[in-house]
Amino acid sequence: MSRLRDVAPFCVLLACCPPAQVHGQPSPPPPAPEPPVPADKIPVHATVLEFKPNAVHDSYEGGGFATFHLTRLRLTAPESLAGRELRVLHDRDVPDGSPWRTPDADLCFLAREADLTSRRQLFAGALAEPCP
């Protein structure tokens, strides 16, 4: 019995601490969890057909105006949306080299399925989240 008493504190130490800490080294941090896909959004895959800078012009009362860049996409997944064309208006600058400017670039983003089935044109903000 005395032998069990001598070993028992060591066993308790092993049970509560990861092995790296037992040997005096810190444990690596656990991997970051994947961000959850919002319940109302689905992953969508698309191919860029074309990019047109300043393609849309909107005039406001008082003489002001805004221009928007346009990216035309062909949706490739999910299957229920494959083949559908979508026009995406960018209200912010799209940097040179961005996949949104590059014909034949493959994109993946999260979007509300209802937006994609009821509309042919959306602002980029509705598609801003990349696939996880």
Image (cartoon, rainbow, N blue to C red):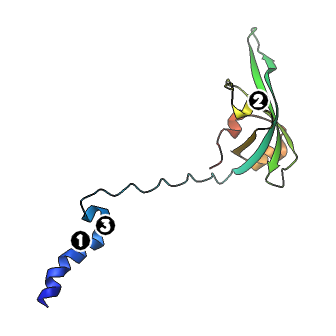
**Quadrant of the image for the N terminus?**
bottom left
The mark lying in front, picked from 2 and 1, is 1
On the picture, is 95 further left or further right than 26? right
Amino acid type at circle 1 is: Leu
Expressed as whole percent of the image width and height from the top left, the position of residue 2 reads: 11, 88
- Examine the rendering and report whether any part of residue 102 can be seen: yes
Tag 2 near tag 3, CB within 8 Å? no
Which structural element holds mark 3?
A: helix
Amino acid type at circle 3 is: Pro
Look at mark 1 in the image and give the residue it sits on. Answer: 13
- Please tell me which residue lies in front, 104 or 88: 104
On the picture, is 82 further left or further right than 129? right
- Inter-mark Cα distance, 1 to 3: 10 Å
The mark lying in front, picked from 1 and 3, is 3
- Circle 3 Cα neighbour tier, 10 Å, few/some/many (<14 / 14–19 / ≥20): some
Expressed as whole percent of the image width and height from the top left, the position of residue 117 reads: 83, 47
Expressed as whole percent of the image width and height from the top left, the position of residue 24 reads: 24, 59
The mark lying in front, picked from 2 and 3, is 3
Please tell me whether residue 130 is drawn above or below residue 63 in the rendered image.
Answer: below
Look at mark 3 in the image and give the residue it sits on. Answer: 19
Please tell me whether residue 11 is drawn above or below residue 18 in the rendered image.
Answer: below
Which structural element holds mark 1?
A: helix
Residue drawn at (78%, 48%) of the image: 114
- Which of the 4 image quadrants contains residue 97? top right
Which structural element holds mark 2?
A: strand
- Which of the 4 image quadrants contains residue 3? bottom left
- Circle 2 Cα neighbour tier, 10 Å, few/some/many (<14 / 14–19 / ≥20): many
- Please tell me which residue lies in front, 78 or 107: 107
Look at mark 2 in the image and give the residue it sits on. Answer: 89
**Comes first in the chain, label 2 or label 3:** 3
Expressed as whole percent of the image width and height from the top left, the position of residue 6 reads: 14, 81
